[in-house]
Image (cartoon, rainbow, N blue to C red):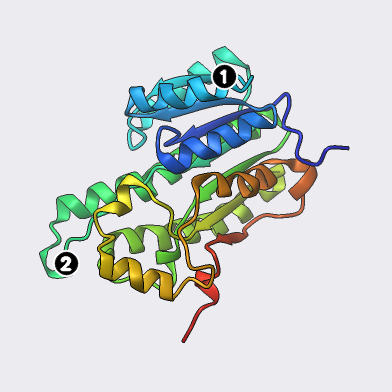
Amino acid sequence: MNLFDLKGTTSVVIGGNGVLGGAMSEGLASQGSRVAIVGRNLDKANEVKQRIELAGGEAMVIQADVTVEDDLKNVLDQVLSWTGSVDIVVNSSGINSSTPFMEIKMDEWDNIMDVNLKSVVLSSQIFGQQMIEQGKGGSIINISSVSSDPPLSKVFTYSASKAGVNSVTKFLAREFAPHQIRVNAIIPGFFPAEQNRKILSPERTESIMTHTPMNRFGNPDELQGTVIYLASVKASSFITGALIRVDGGFGAMTI
């Protein structure tokens, strides 16, 4: 038995047009899952789709504002028209800001909270209900951050939103367990992505390396194994409510 075989499943990757979301989309497709890549930027989403198809996988692109309930319901409708089911959902949308705490405006706070946390709640409601109705279980995988606990300096709102993701993950693990829907989160360390480049000054990069035992940034494809593991009911059937670090040892570091 191949523990990581995802053939016959359909994955919805919210934020699949991003660097990390794109890598996880490709990882799921590599094991046979049909992947719906969801995001605002169609050009980047189509690039991910092309890479998946060149590798022999199946994918579709759906443009959506993941903070809008009707947009996510439309995503569900399109996915059901395509494959007839939803088995795996990855919530990987994320934005960041380095605004100092005393200068944060509420529109910035609301925007980051909407993209990073509200989208997780909305997609879990919409796709979770579909999984319940299908009656065959499923896997919801949320993308948190090492900034969730303890919070990192310079990213106040982002840290608060990701702490919320951790809490929602554990709550939904209990909520959905009777339906055999597993809910887990991946806690990535520092990976090169558009949302964090603006805060990675040379001084901050040096500090990150000092606190990362493996002394390097992660490569986006290094998230693929963990997302495949959590997606596979064969490999992780008794795992729910877990927060799994992929951080080069960052969370193990003190002094």
In the image, what residue occupies the spot 69% across and 32% down? Answer: 31
Q: Nearer the viewer, residue 251 or 110?
A: 251
| Relative side of 7 to 61, left or right | right
Q: Position of residue 115 (x, y in %)?
A: 33, 44
Indicate which disc residue 54 carries.
Answer: 1
Q: Position of residue 225 (x, y in %)?
A: 65, 47
Dot 2: what SS?
Answer: loop
The quadrant where residue 3 appears: top right
Indicate which disc residue 228 carries.
Answer: none
In the image, what residue occupies the spot 33% across and 37% down? Answer: 67
Is any atom of residue 186 visible in this view?
yes
For marks 2 and 1 on the same chain, the one whose residue lies earlier in the sequence: 1
Q: Residue furthest bottom?
A: 255
Which amino acid lies under the numbered mark 2 shown in the image of this protein?
A: Pro
Q: Which residue is under mark 2?
A: 100
In the rendered view, tell whether residue 207 sits above or below residue 37. below
